[in-house]
Image (spheres, grey):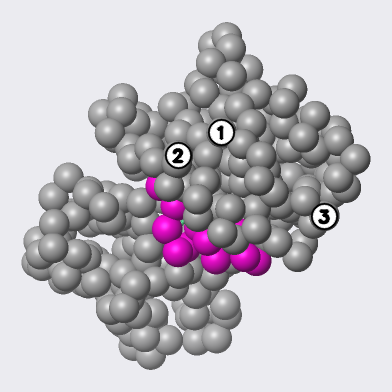
Amino acid sequence: MQVVHTIADLRSALAGRGRPAFVPTMGNLHAGHMSLVRQAKPLGDVLVASIFVNRLQFLPNEDFDSYPRTLQDDCAKLQAEGCDIVFAPKESDLYPEPQTFKVQPDPALADILEGHFRPGFFTGVCTVVLKLFNAVFGSTGGGTAVFGKKDYQQRLVIERMVQQLALPVTIVGAEIARAEGGLALSSRNGYLSAQELEQAQALSRALHALAQATRQGQTPLAQLEAQASAALNALGWQTDYLTVRLRDNLQSPGHAQLASTPLVALGAARLGSTRLIDNLEF
Ligand code: AMP
């Protein structure tokens, strides 16, 4: 496995190796990331993972500085899964000058939910992903990239960007990897105390309960969502949103769509100072 730090070295490493399958990450890899890597392996001729904590997608008061950086451990895990190339640029490699050109995603998709609570988040995500795609696929004629459904809205935004900008990249969505008890695996779970880890299971349970109540169709959705938030807050959380949306565009479903249309329940909430997200398709 090669570990490269610059776009030039990445392109040299990729030369003559066919079409890449690509897994972008911010590192501190856990079993969720590794399931993406395993899924990506057969989807290309050469498997590339990137590790880059992208300042552009953090708000000033968020955890950019304290985000866990564990490059050596990450590389050992990637090597064990048969990864061929790790692209781990320093900030000065990927942003040698201030990144003043940015991707502006469709506000209808990117300014709701996560984008509402983290303004500019998807601009930062799209800008770095487009740049990473150029780095990985720019000299290979395209390929496949795998994104986790854990970040449900992110995957949709990226799919839309690929479509609208005609990028030669196929996006594949991977299912959410969970710990026993249902907590979605996340690098930010490392911020939680043992007690908070127990408490954190309530987020996925809240999504299940909301999904079930939605299908029963007896109570208006807005009321169910408000009840779900209140119930989670009563367990010590501060809920940003617990909501049911259409899977394709994350708009609110109409009443007639509650019975059988494919939907997704999405949630974001803070336990202490740790903000977690999760979702459930139903
Ligand atoms: P991150 O390092 O948090 O930026 O995540 C990198 C990729 O891994 C993204 O596509 C995430 O959606 C995905 N990912 C993170 N956690 C999980 C999980 N528990 N299950 C599946 N995919 C995940």
Label 2 CA crowd tier, 10 Å (few <14, some 14–19, many 20+): some
Which residue is more in the foreground, 209 or 220? 209
Which residue is more in the foreground, 135 or 86? 86
Q: Residue furthest top?
A: 97
Q: Main secondary structure of the magenta part?
A: helix
Is residue 160 located in the magenta-colored stretch of the structure? no
Residue pointed to by mark 2: 71
* First reached walking from the N terminus: tag 2 or tag 3: 3
Q: Is residue 255 visible?
A: yes
Percent x, y of residue 223: 27, 71
Percent x, y of residue 163: 77, 47
Q: Is residue 41 above or below residue 187?
A: below
Is residue 38 located in the magenta-colored stretch of the structure? yes
In whole angstroms, how far apart are the C-alphas of marks 2 and 1? 8 Å
Residue pointed to by mark 3: 45
Label 3 CA crowd tier, 10 Å (few <14, some 14–19, many 20+): some
Which span is picked out in magenta? Answer: 28-39
* First reached walking from the N terminus: tag 2 or tag 1: 2
Which residue is pictured at 13% across the width and 63% down the height?
Answer: 194
In whole angstroms, how far apart are the C-alphas of marks 2 and 3? 24 Å
Q: Is residue 25 above or below residue 210?
A: above
Residue pointed to by mark 1: 88
Q: Is residue 108 visible?
A: no
Which residue is pictured at 69% across the width and 49% down the height?
Answer: 84
In whole angstroms, how far apart are the C-alphas of marks 3 and 1? 20 Å
